[in-house]
Amino acid sequence: MKDFIIKLRKANKLSQEDLAKQIGISRPTLISMEKGERDITLGELKKLSEIFDIPVEIMLDEESSVEARISAQGFTKQSFKRFHNLVLQCIKYGADEDGKITKTKLAKLVYLCDFASYYNFLKPISGFEYRRLAQGPVAIQFFDIIDTDESICVECRGKAMMISLNEQPATSELSKEEEKVIKLVCAKWKKAKTQEIVDFTHNQIPWKVCKEGEVIPYTLINAEEPQNVY
């Protein structure tokens, strides 16, 4: 956990003093936490979750590797490559004119593309599990990519985390039909505000019928009217 906090703090260009103030603790206390000399309280963990926009369960699970998580869930490295490419394509086609997109909006685009593919072809693009979190459905692997992938740039703009590409994604991992779904979904939401796409996913059947933190079955999207799929 201590290394994870240091990585997140530096990635968000925060000094120890800055982060300590946001958590509501002293700088020496934060230093002790980063050195592993002091345990993190539940309240501090929740505060860190809010500051970095990362669910508590992800922070608790940060020590397990991407490969271990994929293996534990029965997915292959090829599945992760496809999911990774899906994320990059959503940045490419869904970002603003400056090439940047909020982390929350990106997560929603990725979800909508995976579930729209299932709706159209009874086969999702990645097949990864999406959970019902406060800001809408999201796959846990999404945070792994955003936090560790060198092809992605993460910047802070006020309270929002802005995502952009350091390099253009390859297209060989996905089929023409899957790429078409991504382009259609991104075209619809490209100019929308983050809250608009969050509200849309909150009004969909998959999010409404599942409980907080629960895995959302892909099959639920088939109960939606076509205009409400994405």
Image (cartoon, helix red, strand yellow):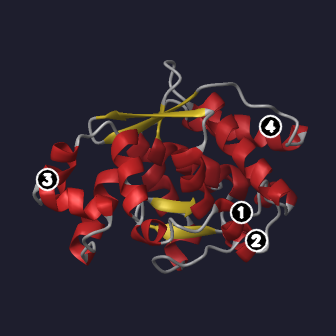
Determine the CA span between mark 2 and mark 3. 39 Å
Q: Does the residue at mark 1 contact the one at mark 2 (Cβ under 8 Å)?
A: yes
Determine the CA span between mark 4 and mark 2. 29 Å
Closer-to-camera residue (85/33):
33
> On the image, numbered disc 1 is attached to which residue?
67
Q: How many marks?
A: 4
Looking at the rendered structure, the secondary structure element under dot 4 is helix
Q: Amino acid at mark 3?
A: Arg
> Going by the image, does 135 lie left or right of 125?
left
> Going by the image, does 80 lie left or right of 196?
right
Looking at the rendered structure, the secondary structure element under dot 2 is helix
Of labels 3 and 4, the one closer to you: 3
Q: Which mark is residue 180?
A: 4
Give the class, few, some or many, for how many residues have Cα within 10 Å of label 4's Cα (few <14, many ≥20).
some
Q: Earlier in the sequence, mark 1 or mark 3?
A: 3
Q: Position of residue 180 (x, y in %)?
A: 80, 37
Camera sees residue 91: yes
Q: Amino acid at mark 2?
A: Ser
Q: Position of residue 141 (x, y in %)?
A: 62, 59
> On the image, numbered disc 3 is attached to which residue?
27
Q: Which mark is residue 71?
A: 2
